[in-house]
Amino acid sequence: MLSAPATAIRFKRLLLTGAAGNLGKVLRPRLKAYCDVLRVSHRRDFGPAGAGEEVVLAELSDRAQVLRLFEGVDAVVHMGGVSTEQPWEDILAGNIVGLVNVYEAARQHKVKRIVFASSNHVTGFYRQDQVISPQDPVRPDGFYGLSKAFGENLAQLYWDRHGLETVSLRIGSSFPEPKDRRMLSTWMSFDDTERLVAAALGAPLVGHTIIYGMSDNASVWWDNTSARHIGYRPQDSSEPFRATVEARQQTIDPHSRTAQFQGGAFVEQGYYD
């Protein structure tokens, strides 16, 4: 776990949604270094508040609950919502209706900035032999990726119309270590995840910026040149894991859609089965 530098931006009250989710659990202890009070939220009970924390339960699809959740908040790290390919009704409630509620609550409570957990699955139907940037057109690989593309468009609308800043993080694969060959390109360490979120919170001017979340891997599909102003500089790499991963996954079927497209298994999951 990193320690916040002395010059890091500090908020009076920072909100972390989805605090009981996979990345929420990782970020929860780390974000306390960037605020006086960390408000943590999830849809269901996930235990008591720790030191320097407030726990507020909220269902994202319930506008009244989200409005209460945002009272007194300076900035938001929004990790809440559906994070995998699921039935459309669940994605609609959490990632579409829920996100509109998040942005309306942020607007009404004059929140300064949102760090939005988007996904690499916004562009999952680009091929693995292509290198793309946040400025390329979206090519979602399912309803989940489509919902994150909606979220990025919503963030752009609220910047253009209301001046609410967002950094949309197209998160790759944030795990303790890469699990397969695909993740040698998409992996982001937990320390680099913290670095990315801290940079997104602390950059002086972001408007609406989209940035891919990845470590300093040797093989990459994403070019973050257009987001250099965020100041994210990854310090870890998947390369130390390469020999182990390649020994575990010695062959790849080049005709498999999961091997052809950046979205991996997501291109074959979900509503079109």
Image (cartoon, rainbow, N blue to C red):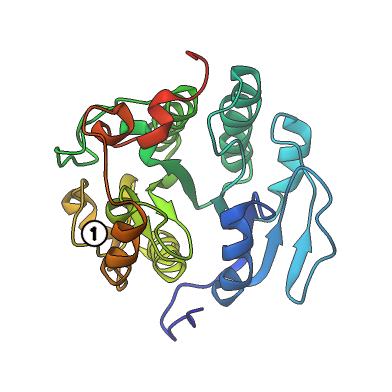
Name the amino acid type tagged 1. Answer: His
Q: Please provide percent x and percent y for residue 69.
A: 73, 47
Q: Please provide percent x and percent y for residue 218.
A: 19, 62
Write the residue at 21% across / 58% down. Answer: 228
Q: Please provide percent x and percent y for residue 47.
A: 84, 60
Looking at the rendered structure, the secondary structure element under dot 1 is: helix
Q: Please provide percent x and percent y for residue 169.
A: 40, 48
Please name the residue that numbered disc 1 is placed on. Answer: 229
Q: Is residue 47 left or right of residue 171?
A: right
Write the residue at 50% across / 53% down. Answer: 112
- The answer to which image quadrant residue 191 occupies is bottom left
| Residue 65 vertical placement versus 144 (above, below) | below
Q: Answer yes or no: is residue 166 visible.
A: yes
Q: Answer yes or no: is residue 232 visible.
A: no
Depth check: give the residue in front, 200 or 95: 95
Q: How many marks?
A: 1
Write the residue at 27% across / 41% down. Answer: 252
Q: Is residue 60 left or right of residue 137?
A: right
| Residue 222 vertical placement versus 176 (above, below) | above
Q: Is residue 265 left or right of residue 93?
A: left
